[in-house]
Image (spheres, rainbow, N blue to C red):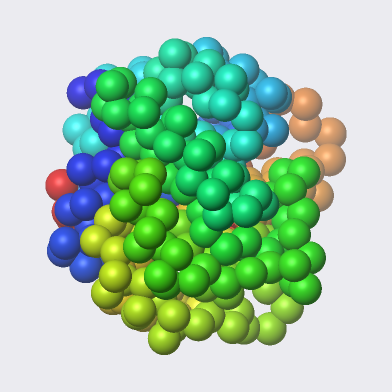
Amino acid sequence: MELVSSTPLLVEARARGYAVVAFNIHTLEMLQAVVEAAETARSPLILQTTVGTVHHLGAEYIAAAAKVAASQATVPIALHLDHCQDFDLILKCMRAGYTSVMMDASMYPFAENVRRTKAVVDVAQALNVNVEAELGKVGGVEDNIVVDEADALLADPAECAAFIEQTGVPTLAPAIGTAHGIYHGEPKIDFARLEQIARMVEVPLVLHGGSGIPTAQVQRCIALGMAKMNVATELKNAFSQAIRQFFIDHPSSLDPRQYMVPAKAGVKQLAREKMEICGCVNRV
Ligand code: 13P
């Protein structure tokens, strides 16, 4: 198969009441591990990279690896660019083969967010690429984007509806109280707000800050219309903790092919757990 747009995967997920998990990957082994997890789980998959990872590995390298993965996979795989504010970088990623992009203009006033998002939607539609936009502001740390708790803003339901109408964006990430990174205590999710947004907006909704949200809260969000969940921090931690443990046990090892084995296994296991929580197992 070729890489697919994430739009149909997410439309189906919302219609059938589950969420597709989007995993932020930073290395070839992380990519392979989540693909293996999706294959064995018979789950659709979204591979996702931050702008920092695009700078780290290169959009072409990432897209090439994702294309190989998709060509060998028997489950649908999309490649998504997470939180990008740079129109030119979005174009570059689409040219390289990304099938889904996020224009994050949530830091601008509403009209400017509409303008910037619509500019991406106009190009992406012609290329059959999904677009995600954000309303409100998700708190926490994602790469070099840092949003203090005091500055995090929840999305306004009426604005969400107007935003979809004015931009035609096919997927929306409304801030509802989750945050990037690990939570101190339970997240304070505004379920009533999510319910209102989901009633006013038909497009699949995206849950940011997927690491560390208790299972019951994740599943309640999905039941209310969240159709994609982003997981970054926990995946990165699983990968790095496994390598750290490997070097504690084998301090003189120097072979990446050895320490990548437990690192991949750790990522694969975490990916499977997230897929089960999100209900996307056995959907293909
Ligand atoms: P976490 O780092 O909390 O998993 O958040 C991921 C995310 O939302 C990426 O956009």
Q: Quadrant of residue 224?
A: bottom left
The total number of labels drawn is 0
Q: Residue at horizontal 55%, vertical 54%?
A: 110
x and y percentages locating residue 132 in the rendered image: 43, 45
x and y percentages locating residue 211 in the rendered image: 57, 63
Q: Residue at horizontal 41%, vertical 86%?
A: 192
Q: Nearer the viewer, residue 271 or 251?
A: 271
Q: Residue at horizontal 78%, vertical 26%?
A: 254
Please indicate whether residue 140 sits to the left or right of residue 92 in the image. Answer: right
Quarter of the image with the N terminus in it: top left
Residue 94 in view (yes/no): yes
Q: Quadrant of residue 2?
A: top left
x and y percentages locating residue 171 in the rendered image: 35, 50
Q: Residue furthest front?
A: 111
Please indicate whether residue 64 sits to the left or right of residue 145 in the image. Answer: left
Q: Is residue 198 above or below residue 124?
A: below
Residue 227 in view (yes/no): no
Q: Nearer the viewer, residue 64 or 270?
A: 64
Q: Is residue 64 above or below residue 46?
A: above
Q: Residue at horizontal 78%, vertical 65%?
A: 148
Q: State which image quarter holds ligand 1.
A: bottom right
Please indicate whether residue 200 sits to the left or right of residue 105 in the image. Answer: left
Please indicate whether residue 55 sits to the left or right of residue 117 in the image. Answer: right
Q: Nearer the viewer, residue 27 or 55?
A: 55
Q: Is residue 149 above or below residue 42?
A: below
Q: Nearer the viewer, residue 32 or 158?
A: 158
x and y percentages locating residue 152 in the rendered image: 68, 68
